[in-house]
Amino acid sequence: MKLGIALFCAASFLNMFSPNMAVFLLFRVLQGAGAAMVFATNTAILVDVYPAEKRGSVMGIAVAAVFTGSAMGPVIGGLITHAFGWRNIFLFITAFSMIAFVTALIKLPNDSAAGKKEKINTASIVLFVLSLGLFMYGLATLKQNLMSYFAFAAGVLLIIVFVRHETRTEVPVVEVRLFRNREFTFANLAALFNFMAVFAVIYLMSIYLQLARGFSADYAGIIMIAQPVVQAVLSPFAGRLADKRSPSVIASIGMGCCTAALFMFIFINETTPVIYIIAGLLVTGLGIALFSSPNSSRIMGSVANKDYGVASSIMSTARIVGQGIGMALLTIIINAVIGNVPIAEVAPALIVRNIQITFPIFTAICAAGIVFSLMHRKGGGADKGVTIAPEGL
């Protein structure tokens, strides 16, 4: 985790001096690598140092911190860009990353000596990166050119090859054996579907409010901040509730709220009252708050202690892949409805039309996620705060 923060901090600092887009993207890739190291380990560290009966509360606080950052980031970034230019955003990021790094050095235990050195499986890493990269690129660019279809097909094929490779190698990057555990598998599928469905809401609402309704960026931002604020405020409560009640049931209620909110957005048009839009965003925030920390608690409670790190990384991957697929689906719909036209030049009616096509699809995806969220062990150990080993082991 410390290495990840350091890499993220260094890449952020170097991005201030990017001379062109190629160098900028290179440093962004390094930022992503550093962030991946943090996301893949922070949950495992939290779960490892707190007792099982407090797992939900801890996850709720962690999720609230994420949502608070999500709410503050765009607002602060917009102010910095407006006043000082975009490069200074990375100066701000570097400063906070340095604070995080120093805090990690002081507060986090240094357990490298106690840990057993593992071999690096280069073949697994290459297969994983290539399979997901080609799959996501192909999906996001479908219908743009013939190569997109080849990339998508190659990605699907390599994912199959990767899974087969992981079941046979001695040092897997992804512990495929964990997916024999129904609790772990269905909770991760629920997370995948949830983030696939709701991640694009803020992006779509931003376009709608500014281009279809003509609101200023500041006013649109004030409206949209309703969602992450609700998420940040209610996530700790949802986490504590998950310590006392079934996490799968609470998460399923959250998925139901998200589905209801996405259904509300289907009926948006060029004259929809702002209060209706805010209500939809508030219900979305409520749904995500009720889903995220209980579902994370459920995932981490379904594996043995030695698998916390792997489970945390798989959970992060499910979230990121879900977000990526959601944005790829949105891109496909935008290309089909609007075409290859600068978004600022699109007629308001087409933006509304895009929304009325997109949200029924995302509503259906979120509704399917409820099914996965409801699938859990009868008398499941994870729901009672007891760590259970994967099935079949």
Image (spheres, grey):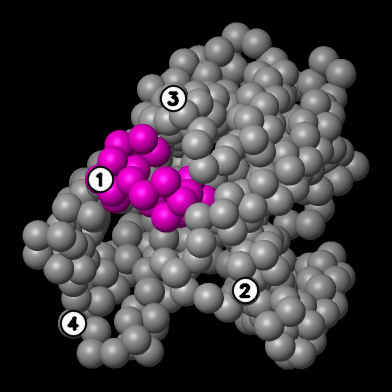
Task: Tell me which segment is drawn in magenta.
Answer: 203-225
Judging by the rendered image, the residue that carries numbered circle 3 is 275
Q: Position of residue 322 (x, y in %)?
A: 65, 53
Q: Position of residue 255 (x, y in %)?
A: 67, 29
Q: Nearer the viewer, mark 2 or mark 4?
A: 2
Question: Distance from label 3 to label 1 (Cα)?
Answer: 17 Å
Q: Earlier in the sequence, mark 4 or mark 3?
A: 4
Apparent side of residue 26 relative to residue 186 in the rendered image (left or right): left
Residue at the spot 47% in from the left edge and 74% down from the top edge: 342
Q: Earlier in the sequence, mark 2 or mark 4?
A: 4
Specify whether residue 50 is painted magenta: no
Q: Earlier in the sequence, mark 3 or mark 1?
A: 1
Q: Secondary structure at mark 4?
A: loop
What's under tag 4, amino acid-wise? Phe
Q: Position of residue 321 (x, y in %)?
A: 63, 58
Judging by the rendered image, the residue that carries numbered circle 1 is 218
What's under tag 3, amino acid-wise? Ile
**Which secondary structure class fits the magenta region best?**
helix
Q: Nearer the viewer, mark 1 or mark 2?
A: 2
Judging by the rendered image, the residue that carries numbered circle 2 is 339
Q: Secondary structure at mark 3?
A: helix
Judging by the rendered image, the residue that carries numbered circle 4 is 17
Q: Secondary structure at mark 1?
A: helix
Specify whether residue 207 is painted magenta: yes
- Residue farthest to the top, as pictured: 244
Q: Position of residue 388 (x, y in %)?
A: 74, 30
Residue 154 appears in the picture as rendered:
yes
Which numbered circle lies on residue 301?
none
